[in-house]
Amino acid sequence: MIVLAYILLACFAGTALSLAIAALVAFRVQARWIPTLVSFAVGALLGAAFLDLLPHLFEESRNPGRTAAFILFGLLAFFVLEKLLLWRHHHHHEGEEPESRAGPVAVDHDHGHTGWMIVFGDAFHNFTDGVIIASAFMADVKLGVVTSLAIIAHEIPQEIGDFLVLLHSGFGKGRALALNALSGMAAMLGAVIAWLALSSVSGWIPDILAFAAASMIYIAVADLIPGLHKRNALSESLTQVAFIALGIGAIWAIHAVLFPGV
């Protein structure tokens, strides 16, 4: 039971710390900067997927074909999910007068469907983090502490990106914070399940991670990047490229510091 307490404390502390730092950054951002900073979210999502999750998946997987199939299935699943969210919005607002596109808020908001997708995808990722933390603590407490610190460090830039996506998608700051906290609690659920049945759950880690990677790639490429193309002035385009590179660089730098030579 002491090990379980360590596991839950690590999951809760990691979620609270990464969320607090993300909120501190995001709450200081002026509304007019949110569309530009979405570029950072694109970089953080793609960096986490291509520099962290996918290399780990294909190095550890005994069946790369199965892993690739789960990534493909994840992309299709998020396409269907977005279709359902768009259909729900269209059905709910059918017959209403179209909104004015003149205001700065209406131009950028997408009625929340991208935000809900980021919440679902982040919940899968956090669930897996909980499983990994539990596995590390059950092997050795020191390994559990190191693993938890590594996961927290990886989560901070991603949580900042997630928070910005929720704001960009039309959620208020309070609601965005609450949804990020809720998806973060999935780590505790994953940790408890792993502690109760690690042998059966651990075999599904690559598949869950593949689904999480698919969510990051889909949201960045299918939802966020097309929005960036709506702002095509040269200065804005250069800023977008710079912030995408900054998001990727943040993931790369943390990975290089925590896992040098890997």
Image (cartoon, rainbow, N blue to C red):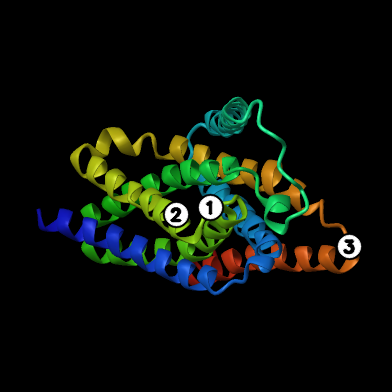
Q: Which one is closest to the eye, mark 2 or mark 3?
A: 2
| Front in this rendered view, residue 156 or 80 | 80
Residue 173 x/y as whole percent: 49, 61
The residue positioned 66% from the left and 48% from the top of the image is 220
- Expressed as whole percent of the image width and height from the top left, the position of residue 248 reads 65, 62
Judged from the image, the secondary structure of the residue bearing numbered disc 2 is: helix
Looking at the rendered structure, the kind of residue marked 2 is Arg
Q: In this rendered view, identify the residue nearer to me: 92 or 222.
A: 92
Residue at position x 53%, y 33% in the image: 67
Q: Name the residue under label 1.
A: 171
Q: Which residue corresponds to the image point at 60% horizontal and 54% vertical from the top-left?
A: 45
Helix, strand, or loop for circle 1?
A: loop
Of badges 1 and 3, the one in the foreground is 1
Q: Residues within 10 Å of mark 1 (few under 14, many from 20)?
A: many
Residue at the limit of the structure toward the right, as seen here:
234
Callout count? 3
Residue at numbered disc 3: 233
Which SS class for mark 3? loop
Q: How far apart are marks 1 and 2 (CA)?
A: 6 Å
Query: In the picture, residue 81 is in which quadrant?
Result: top right
- Amino acid at dot 3: Ala
The residue that mark 2 highlights is 175
- Residue 65, above or below 242: above
Residue nearest the observer in this picture, 46 or 119: 119
Q: How crowded is mark 2: few (under 14 residues within 10 Å), some or many (20 or more)?
A: few
Is the Cβ of the residue at disc 1 closer than 8 Å to that at disc 3?
Answer: no
User: What amino acid is found at the position of numbered circle 1 in the picture?
Assistant: Phe
